[in-house]
Image (tube, rainbow, N blue to C red):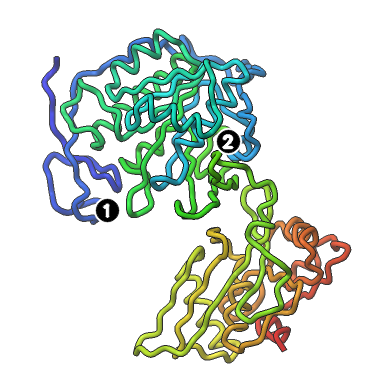
């Protein structure tokens, strides 16, 4: 074995340094340097060369078997149409949010289509997996369960069984006995992920890897782990609630930003095919502090409800709290309301919530935020069956947003008959029958709708 050299790598920026330092000189983050070991080059047993010689891009052929649907429509949507042969997929989320449940349900659906599945569980025993499968109503002979954490033994079984799909649950518990580092460390995760990548590409096996999420909301391990894999999926939502959102933040075989919505029941995760009915109840107009907007996630649009509570503060510094939206954006919009619309909120606590646990970051949310805050401050409800869509500029002007027609069609389907939109969107839109469009040049005019 070649002599090993110890280096120190930053988990934040992936910078490499010859000695440990309390603060990374590259990204200025504290306590992010971890020990790494450079040794001899190792080859992955059982893996083959991906390709002998370079070929012309025009000569590369795509077969029909390159992508296989999972028979779970919401998951297929996020993946871009199904799993791809030879791909490495990372799925992350908070503990108890449903990652293992989703993997077991996916394995069951694929096994019914004749695929051979190897489920490698490093955190649960075979009995525990059997108990979960019984609860989910899963009893498939094509799913092979292997409770193991040592990477070399996992490679032996993959080479022997030659499955069509491998599930590693989880990457933090799997480690190599050839690496002098503790399980879950940066060195182990980097080496293990590299080996799994070579297995996926060299043996043409689809590999799903489950990753834990840290307190900061990132998948545990170096950011290089996300750069290495082909697809990164995140489970969002409160683990104590019923609804989950699966989001693709990286996808080499499809579009990013796609979302799938699921509901957690005693029998597992169930698809929610109409998300708008999940996030919006009724047509509004009953109470102040509520507005509705239509957001775009990937290729689909659905409605979300924006709630706001404005109350006089008892502190010298008023509080600004946002749930599901950007706090900095809210601060800017409050300044616009005070400067351009004459609504003074500097002595009030303000809480904004996107109902249902949805997270929206696009600028089209601006108008709905402004309307909800102003409605609560003035104690005047937004007119019934009215949807608010638009970006608000620093001068209070309404700026156009994209996919307006798709948004309005979704609003019409849910029974909304009036829409506040930027005036510039009127010129580039095909009118949606049944929806009254009110083009607003300035946010001040939009607030006049409150009466």
Q: Nearer the viewer, residue 163 or 32?
A: 163
Between circles 1 and 2, the one closer to the viewer is 2
Q: Which label number is shown at residue 79?
A: 2
Q: Nearer the viewer, residue 324 or 424?
A: 324
Vertical order, 355 against 394 (above or below)? above
Let me know if residue 136 appears in the view: yes
Indicate left or right for 275 with 313 as reference: right
Vertical order, 2 against 393 (above or below)? above
> Circle 1 is placed at which residue position?
27
Label 2: state its secondary structure.
helix
Q: Residue 98 placed where, x, y %? A: 47, 42
Label 1: state its secondary structure.
loop
Mark 1 vs mark 2: which is more N-terminal? 1
Q: Residue at x 16, y 27 (%)?
A: 180
Let me know if residue 259 appears in the view: no
Are there few (<14), some (14-19), or many (20+) residues within 10 Å of tag 2?
A: many
Q: Residue at x 50, y 45 (%)?
A: 249
Q: Which label number is shown at residue 284?
A: none
Indicate left or right for 410 with 257 as reference: right
Q: Residue 442 placed where, x, y %? A: 68, 81
Are there few (<14), some (14-19), or many (20+) residues within 10 Å of tag 1?
A: few
Query: Which quarter of the picture shows residue 304?
Result: bottom right
């Amino acid at each position: 074995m070649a002599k090993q050299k110890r280096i120190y790598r930053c988990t934040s920026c992936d910078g490499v340094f010859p000695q440990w330092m309390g603060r990374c000189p590259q990204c200025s983050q504290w306590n992010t340097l971890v020990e790494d070991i450079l040794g001899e080059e190792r080859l992955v047993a059982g893996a083959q060369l991906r390709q002998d010689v370079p070929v012309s891009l025009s000569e590369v052929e795509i077969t029909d078997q390159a992508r296989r649907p999972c028979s779970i429509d919401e998951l297929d949507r996020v993946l871009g149409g199904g799993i791809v042969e030879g791909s490495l997929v990372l799925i992350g989320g908070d503990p108890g949010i449903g990652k293992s449940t989703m993997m077991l349900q996916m394995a069951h659906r694929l096994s019914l289509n004749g695929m051979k599945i190897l489920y490698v569980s490093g955190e649960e025993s075979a009995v525990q997996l059997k108990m979960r499968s019984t609860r989910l109503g899963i009893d498939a002979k094509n799913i092979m369960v292997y409770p193991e954490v040592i990477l070399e033994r996992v490679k032996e079984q993959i080479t022997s069984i030659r499955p069509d799909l491998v599930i590693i649950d989880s990457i933090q518990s799997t480690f190599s006995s050839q690496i002098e580092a503790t399980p879950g460390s940066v060195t182990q995760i980097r080496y293990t992920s590299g080996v799994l990548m070579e297995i996926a590409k060299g043996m043409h096996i689809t590999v799903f890897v489950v990753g834990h999420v840290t307190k900061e909301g990132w998948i545990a391990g170096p950011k290089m782990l996300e750069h290495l894999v082909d697809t990164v999926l995140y489970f969002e939502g409160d683990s104590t609630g019923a609804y989950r959102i699966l989001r693709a933040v990286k996808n080499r075989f499809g579009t990013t930003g796609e979302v799938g919505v699921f509901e957690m029941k005693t029998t597992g995760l169930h698809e929610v095919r109409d998300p708008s009915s999940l996030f919006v109840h009724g047509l509004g107009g009953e109470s102040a502090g509520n507005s509705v907007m239509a957001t775009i996630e990937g290729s689909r649009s659905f409605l979300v409800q924006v709630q706001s509570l404005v109350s006089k503060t008892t502190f010298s510094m008023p509080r600004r709290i946002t749930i599901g939206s950007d706090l900095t954006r809210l601060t800017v919009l409050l300044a616009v309301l005070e400067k351009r619309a004459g609504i003074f909120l500097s002595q009030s606590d303000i809480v904004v919530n996107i109902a249902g646990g949805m997270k929206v970051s696009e600028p089209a949310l601006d108008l709905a935020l402004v309307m909800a805050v102003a409605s609560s401050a003035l104690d005047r409800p937004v007119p019934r069956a009215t949807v608010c869509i638009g970006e608000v500029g620093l001068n209070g002007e309404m700026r156009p947003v994209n996919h307006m027609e798709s948004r309005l069609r979704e609003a019409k389907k849910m029974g909304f008959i009036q829409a506040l939109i930027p005036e510039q969107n009127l010129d580039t839109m095909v009118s949606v029958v049944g929806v009254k469009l009110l083009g607003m040049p300035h946010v001040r005019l939009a607030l006049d709708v409150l009466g």
